[in-house]
Amino acid sequence: MHKRTITVILRITACGALSFPAHADPWIPPNGAGVIKPVIRFYHGARLFPRTRFGATTTPSNSVENETQIRLTGDHGLGHDWALQYDLRAARETKSKTSRHNTTRYQASGLGDQEIGIVHGLHQGRGFADSIAINAVLATGSTTSNPRLGVGHDAVEPDYEFGFSHRLGSRFMYGSFAVGPRIFTNSGIVEWRMAGEVGTQVVPRFYAFATFFSSRTFGSDASNANAPNASEYYNIARVGLGIQYKLTQSFRPLFQYEKDVAGQNIHAGHRVVIGFSWKY
C-alpha cells in the first residue's frame, strides 16, 4: 500500500488527537488534507493543591473557579511531510471569593493565549510514526482582566511526538504521545510537558480512549508568594476518559471527562469536553 494511502487511513482511525496539548498526532496529513477539532470545555475547581509540595491531597479553596472554553485545534498538511498545527482558544471565566461576611464574584470573557506551529514527520510507517514540532505560544489573553485570560508572556514550545497503531483481530488500537518544554521568552519560566492518548475500538463505530497530561515548572518558587513569577509556577497531573462515535468516515462526535489528580500551587478541578473531529 502506498505510504500516503496508509497515512490517510491512520489519520482517520486516530483523529481523536490529544485534548491537551492538541498537537500530538505524529502522522502527517497529505498536502491540503487535515483534521479540525472544535470543542467546548466546562471546567470547575473548588479545591487547592498545596503550595509547598506536589501531591494528590487537596484542601478547600476560598475561591471557586469556573470556565467555559471554546477551543479549536487541528492539523493541515503542507506537503513533503510538513504540516501546520494550531490551538486557538476563547473563554468565559468566573471566580467567586468567599469571605466571612460576603461572596465577591469576578468575570471575564475573551481570547486566551493562542498556539500555532509547524510539524515535520520523521518516520511515517504503518505501525509507528514520529515527528518533531516547533510551536509559538502567543500571549493574546488579557492579563488586566479579573480573572486573567492569559499568562502575559510569549513562549516557544519544541516537541517530540510519536505514536503507534496496531490491529488485534478485528479490533484497532492506537497511541500517540508528545514531550517537550514550553520556554517563556521573558519570564524565566520553563514548563516540561508530557501528554498522551491511547484508544481502541470497543464496538463497531464506537471508540474509547484514555488521556494523560503532566507539566512540571522550573524557574520560580511556588512556596514564596512574593517571588518573581510565583503566580505562574505550578505542577499538574491530569487524566481523562472519553468516547468517540464514527458517524461518517470524516465526522466523529466525542465526549470526554478529565480530572486533576495531583498538583502544586493550582486549583484542583475537573472538565467535561464536548465536540467533534472532522477530517477533510
Image: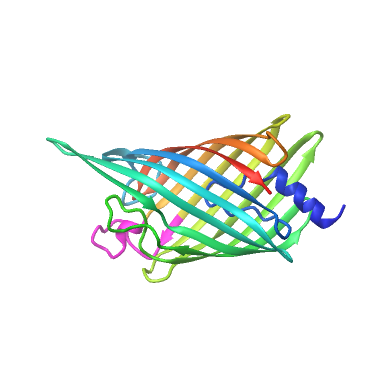
Percent coordinates x, y for residue 246 in the rendering: 68, 35
The secondary structure making up most of the magenta span is loop
Percent coordinates x, y for residue 2 in the rendering: 86, 55
Question: For the view shown, which residue lies furthest in the top direction?
Answer: 203
Left/right of residue 219 with respect to residue 114 in the rendered view:
left
Question: For the view shown, which residue lies furthest in the right direction?
Answer: 1
User: Which quadrant holds residue 227?
Assistant: bottom left
Q: What residue range appears in magenta?
A: 216-233
In the rendered image, the vertical position of residue 128 relative to residue 185, given as above or below:
above
Percent coordinates x, y for residue 65 in the rendering: 32, 41
User: Which quadrant holds residue 98?
Assistant: top left
Residue at x 38%, y 42% (from the top left corner): 67
* Front-lying residue, 273 or 46: 273
User: Which quadrant holds residue 97?
Assistant: top left
* Front-lying residue, 209 or 277: 277
Residue 226: within the magenta? yes
Residue at x 38%, y 71% (from the top left corner): 186
Count how many numbered circles sit on residues in the image. Answer: 0
